[in-house]
Amino acid sequence: MINLKAPGAPVLLILAMTLSTVCKLQFLYQVTVIPGQIVSSSLRTILVLFLLYLLTALISDRRHYYLVLCIHFLLSLIIFADILYYKHFNIFPTVNELMLVNTLPSILESIAVLFRFQYLLVFADLFLFSLPMLQKCLCSSRFVLHPIYAVLLFVLLLTPLALDLKVSFGGEKEKLFHTHGIFYEQISKLFMSNSSKHEGDAAPTQPIADVPKKTALARRYEKIAEGRNVIVIQVEALQDFVLNMSYNGQELTPNLNSLLKQDTIYFSRYYQQIGRGGTSDAEFVTQNSLYPSMNVYSYKRYIGNEFLGLPRILKEKGYTAVAFHGYKPEFWNRSTIYPILGYDRFYSKKDFVHDDIIGWGVSDRSFFKQSAKYLSEVKQPFLSFLITLSSHHPYALPEKHKKIKLMPEHYSTLLGRYFQTINYTDAALGLFIQELKDRKLYGNSIIAIYGDHRAIDNQVPLDKRHVSNLLGYNFDYDESLNVPLIIHIPGSDLCETNETIGGHIDFLPTLLNLLGIEESRTKFFGRDLNNTNDSFIAFQTVMLEGSFIDHEKIFVRSRDGVFENSLAWKLATKEPIPVSECVPGYRRAIREIRESEYILSNNLIGKIPQDMAVESFAWSKAGFAKRIIHLLRSIPDYLMIRL
Ligand code: GP9
Ligand code: MN
């Protein structure tokens, strides 16, 4: 028991709390980071924690105890939130995200599913540390900051700075987690979130040499959907593997499957590319062909920007742009950013009759029915962007809608619930297509359907085993992150499966080619998937920044920050390959993300044309001092290339 009347007790208390928090960090890493890649709390984290607690010693009366207890509670709470967040997104949150408590009510159901009682262990010691308070033995506590502590504080303050000299360079932000420690990483983002010229202020510094040269191909399918209405449907948690799957003798997605059979180009190796913003980042990347922010969700981070993405470009061609989503308009900042993106009208939950609610909002069935009616009143040609919701985690579909006969091993599992909800959403999609036909909107439209992000996590052993058994091969990142893109062009007679590796970032250039719209005023980071032989996709979440998939392999960057501990394997045979073969792809992934970040952070959309290298633009704009700084900054990159 801690007796705070004893001399030096406050220091003991601080030491005990520091030690306890370090143990909690170990626990955090144990339950989150990939098994076998457990990292230790760095020395720096321990020092910073100790320093943080020690600062409370500046208060010399009983308030010291309460303050230190508050800090300890807060850190425990952050660690607890980190665990749950990581379980959902496979990445640690920034402080910015931890502060988005207004979203908490919406995700309570998901949290309940992810929650395990063992996570409460992070609060276990609070009872112990609270005992002195219960015993009211604090009153005479005195702790004056002795000169020796002042020196100690000074040294501790300097140590992290000194250690900074050894930090790995190269813009690999996730490395901060291993070098500065998780708290530093989380807090540092706080200071970057709201102003525009920050994280991407530094120009990208690596040469562009290893980008595969564009091969001159005849432009396939150019103008094939010229002048048509554009209907984009972003389906919540639609995974590729459910398409055409025969499950227990049933089709999970019969309506999507039938679309694949006619008038469709099916992109079967199409990947999610979200950052911090889940669904909203999928929207952001899809409509702008730029990488999402890893600071806070893009619709918040880049709210001050001007955009030249899908809605704006089509509006310039005479389209009306409307968006539909059956949830609160302000969620993910949609109601604020949609007009900035160029939308004329956003139909949200407020505009729908709430005749059928599933989970967070209007059921997909009712949503599609009401949206079709609204659409029939919109001036043509139109761009309509519809975001579904019913298949949202934790996939709690009302009994009456469940149509799939589950295999016994999938009763009461996440996978079983997912199959039911995605089957429901597929049925709703089928009804929507019928509504479009009935309202004479089908034949003159191009309909693009894709998933926003995965539903099933390949890192959860039970889910992985179940899906692997169904697929007959290992369900890993290359399958889990695959969200399909289906482009349906009625009357086109196309029936093609395109296996080019692509993702959300490729949507806009691919669609614009089909519509016959040239856009070279601004830089897109994606490619027209019908006209490229460059199979490549870069990730930032789930797999860390620098991870990528190309035509033959997947590279999964190690979470311990050591490149050599990363994993890579051949897509076709799953055979491991040396990570040294992945260095060019890794560098390309980092560079592209950094270039995109530079454009967005400096509000440069529309200012760097498609055919201009971001690096040379940045260089031409930089003053003398900046050039020197850029040069110095490029040294570690250069060294890394040589290593
Ligand atoms: C909320 C919906 C869900 O409007 O788009 O977002 P998510 O939780 O999947 O990111
Ligand atoms: Mn989503």
Image (cartoon, helix red, strand yellow):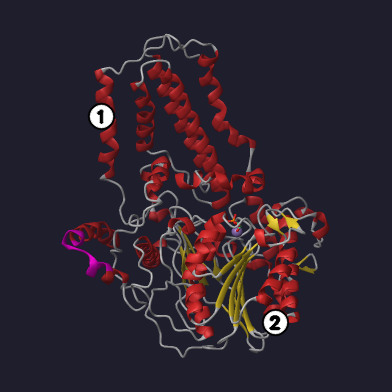
- Relative to residue 279, is residue 591 drawn left or right? left
As for residue 621 lying within the magenta part, the answer is: yes
**Label 1 Cα neighbours within 10 Å, binned few <14 / some 14-19 / many ≥20:** few
The quadrant in which residue 304 appears is bottom left
Image coordinates for residue 211, horizontal then vertical, percent:
36, 74
Report if residue 224 is visible in the image.
yes
The quadrant in which residue 200 appears is bottom left
Identify the residue position indicated by label 2 in the image.
Answer: 261
* Chain part drawn in magenta: 618-627
Badge 2 amino acid: Lys
Q: Regarding ligand 2, which quadrant of the image does it lie in? A: bottom right
Identify the residue position indicated by label 1 in the image.
Answer: 154
Q: Is mark 1 within 8 Å of ligand 1?
A: no
Residue 175 to residue 507: above or below: above
Report if residue 94 is visible in the image.
no
Camera-nearest label, 2 or 1: 1
Q: Mark 2 falls on what kind of element?
A: loop
Name the image quarter holding the C terminus: bottom left
Residue 220 to residue 62: above or below: below
The quadrant in which residue 401 appears is bottom right
Question: Disc 2 or 1, which lies upstream in sequence?
Answer: 1
